[in-house]
């Protein structure tokens, strides 16, 4: 019975949506948004739109506002959207946002009316790419972060939700381990120099060499992490500079 009621309400809602004018909005004069009438697919409302840009290869951040019953204030707390929404949305046609309305409004009134506003903004670049003409300062910032705390620069530039601190932890563990093992190698080598028994001489010499090897391995691991972090961030920064120039 619930399914039949929900289906009846959705049919009523479809009629309302098809008659309701849609709103398209783009803040930038260098592009515009064309929004089509909403349609219904099962229990999801489909909002189709195009991003028409004067230049290609642009990424946008797309947001949506929903207005109910002619209100001027967007509804809050809506989360059941998927499709071409959020960051890294390229320009072009055939974009769509799908709203599972029953997840946000399980009890829809037959007279409810909804209108949608599509907001598109040229994607914001990171703090390292806000001014590509200033090459030196951002480069030093990246180099400094990659040398002091690899993982943080990577996190800020790529904005990935990941435990970036693990890379920093491994980096410092390698440095601390390398220093400790190098000190142990030097200590065993000093004991080797003053040892008189053959067994002691061989033992101290072997320990000194092994500790030295492990010390070098630790330093190589830390150095590789730092170099990889700096290289990835620097290459990404160059790509963002190209994107910035396109968006000017």
Image (tube, rainbow, N blue to C red):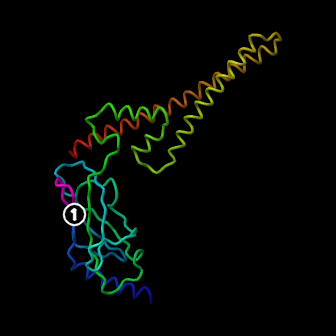
Is 138 inside the magenta-drawn segment? no
In the figure, residue 170 lies in which quadrant? Answer: top right
Q: Is residue 156 above or below residue 171?
A: below
Q: Position of residue 43 (x, y in %)?
A: 37, 77
Name the side, left or right, on which 193 lies relative to 60: right
Is 28 inside the magenta-drawn segment? yes
Badge 1 crowding class, 10 Å Cα cut-off, few under 14, some 14 to 19, many 20 or more, is: some
Q: Is residue 190 above or below residue 151?
A: above
* Quadrant for the C terminus in the image: top left
- Residue position for label 1: 25
Q: Position of residue 109 (x, y in %)?
A: 35, 85
Q: Position of residue 142 (x, y in %)?
A: 40, 35
- At numbered mark 1, what does the secondary structure look like: helix, strand or loop? strand
Question: Which of 25/217 is in front?
Answer: 25
* Quadrant for the N terminus in the image: bottom left
Q: Which residues are magenta?
A: 24-32
Name the side, left or right, on which 175 lies relative to 56: right
């Amino acid at each position: 019975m619930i399914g039949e009621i929900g289906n009846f309400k959705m049919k009523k809602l479809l009629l309302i949506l098809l008659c309701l004018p849609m709103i398209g909005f783009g803040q930038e004069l260098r592009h515009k948004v064309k929004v089509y009438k909403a349609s219904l697919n099962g229990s999801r409302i489909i909002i189709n739109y195009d991003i028409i840009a004067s230049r290609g290869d642009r990424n946008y951040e797309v947001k949506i506002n929903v207005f109910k019953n002619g209100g001027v204030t967007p509804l809050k707390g809506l989360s059941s959207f998927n499709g071409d929404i959020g960051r890294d949305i390229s320009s072009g046609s055939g974009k769509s946002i799908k709203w599972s309305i029953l997840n946000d409004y399980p009890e829809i009134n037959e007279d409810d009316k909804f209108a949608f506003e599509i907001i598109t903004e040229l994607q914001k670049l990171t703090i390292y790419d806000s001014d590509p003409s200033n090459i030196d300062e951002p480069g030093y910032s990246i180099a400094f972060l990659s040398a002091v705390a690899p993982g943080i620069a990577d996190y800020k530039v790529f904005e990935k939700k990941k435990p970036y601190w693990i890379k920093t932890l491994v980096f410092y563990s390698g440095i601390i381990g390398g220093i400790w093992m190098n000190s142990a190698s030097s200590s065993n080598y000093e004991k080797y120099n003053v040892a008189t028994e053959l067994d002691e001489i061989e033992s101290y010499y072997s320990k000194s060499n092994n500790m030295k090897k492990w010390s070098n391995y630790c330093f190589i691991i830390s150095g590789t992490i730092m170099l990889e972090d700096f290289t990835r961030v620097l290459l990404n920064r160059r790509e963002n500079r190209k994107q910035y120039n396109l968006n000017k």
